[in-house]
Image (spheres, rainbow, N blue to C red):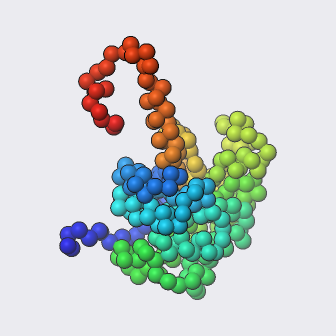
């Protein structure tokens, strides 16, 4: 059965790419489905984030999504519900190779995030082995301190103003801008965002702060075109839509293409029964 064993993980590809200045593109998982997670992972994303903050996913389903992501060849990450000790430590124990931590608004918030993700003497993470330890080509304790992707969310105008201090914290690998919450904190709607707006200026300020201190900046994007544009600007940790958004978009497009009058002629491809 040795031939069926998975390859041991030597380093975290996400952390390695971000520290090396390379773009790293992934997507969000909101459907609470390990099957969907495995299907997405097989498409070639660098990473996939199980959204534990804004989806109804349960803890065991989250764990099974991590397994499916790993099986499909992507790096399993999670967005925890809050910058809180129990969620951070339990999610890491379940096998996440990095976390996106919301509402990090100050240097102290960032220090707390890192402390919860590192073992003593560098942090306060309580020791146990992780589910993913068996798949590592190293001792998990020391591997985790150097390889976990610590991504703090900058999603308020207060955090934007403190971006350099936040990103200067030892152990922070990068940041992830939440454009919707940032707009809320600025008292504007998403219709008031885009090129030339204060919202765009705030995001670019975070990008420059990240470059200054040698950290990766990222954000959630809604189209492939935006991902490409942001890579050109120097953003690295970029999310493209989500499993739920892809499902809805494809389903809506196919439904809208149905000719309910039955007047359109079908090609051989239309009759093949293939969905993709």
**In front: 247, or 259?**
259
Extreme-front residue of the structure: 261
Determine whether, in the image, residue 25 is placed left or right of residue 170. Answer: left
User: For the point 77% across and 47% down, which residue is it?
Assistant: 186
Q: Is residue 243 above or below residue 84?
A: above
Extreme-bottom residue of the structure: 121
- Quadrant showing the C terminus: top left
User: For the point 44% across and 79% down, which residue is it?
Assistant: 140
- Tag count: 0
Please indicate, yes or no, whether residue 60 appears anywhere in the rendered image.
Answer: yes
Q: Position of residue 240 (x, y in %)?
A: 51, 46
Extreme-right residue of the structure: 187
Q: Position of residue 151 (x, y in %)?
A: 58, 63
User: For the point 46% across and 55% down, which residue is it?
Assistant: 33
**In front: 107, or 67?**
67
Q: Position of residue 179 (x, y in %)?
A: 65, 47
Q: Is residue 102 above or below residue 130?
A: above
Q: Quadrant of residue 261?
A: top left
């Amino acid at each position: 059965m040795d031939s069926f064993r998975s390859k041991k993980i030597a380093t975290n590809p996400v952390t390695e790419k971000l520290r090396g200045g390379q773009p790293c593109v992934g997507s969000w998982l909101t459907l609470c489905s390990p099957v969907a997670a495995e299907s997405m992972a097989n498409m070639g994303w660098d990473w996939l984030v199980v959204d534990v903050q804004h989806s109804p996913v349960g803890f065991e389903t989250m764990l099974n999504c991590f397994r499916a992501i790993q099986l499909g060849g992507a790096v399993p990450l999670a967005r925890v519900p809050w910058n809180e000790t129990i969620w951070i430590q339990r999610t890491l124990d379940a096998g996440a190779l990095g976390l996106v931590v919301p509402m990090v608004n100050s240097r102290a918030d960032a220090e707390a995030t890192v402390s919860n993700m590192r073992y003593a003497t560098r942090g306060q993470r309580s020791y146990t082995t992780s589910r993913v330890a068996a798949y590592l080509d190293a001792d998990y304790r020391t591997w985790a301190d150097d390889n976990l992707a610590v991504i703090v969310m900058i999603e308020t105008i207060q955090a934007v103003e403190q971006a350099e201090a936040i990103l200067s914290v030892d152990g922070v690998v990068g940041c992830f801008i939440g454009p919707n919450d940032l707009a809320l904190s600025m008292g504007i709607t998403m219709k008031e965002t885009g090129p030339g707006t204060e919202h765009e200026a705030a995001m670019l300020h975070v990008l420059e702060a990240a470059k200054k201190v040698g950290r990766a900046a990222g954000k959630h994007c809604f189209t492939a075109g935006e991902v490409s544009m942001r890579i050109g600007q120097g953003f690295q940790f970029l999310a493209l839509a989500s499993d739920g958004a892809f499902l809805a978009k494809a389903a809506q497009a196919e439904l809208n293409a149905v000719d309910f009058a039955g007047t359109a002629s079908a090609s051989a491809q239309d009759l093949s029964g293939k969905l993709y």
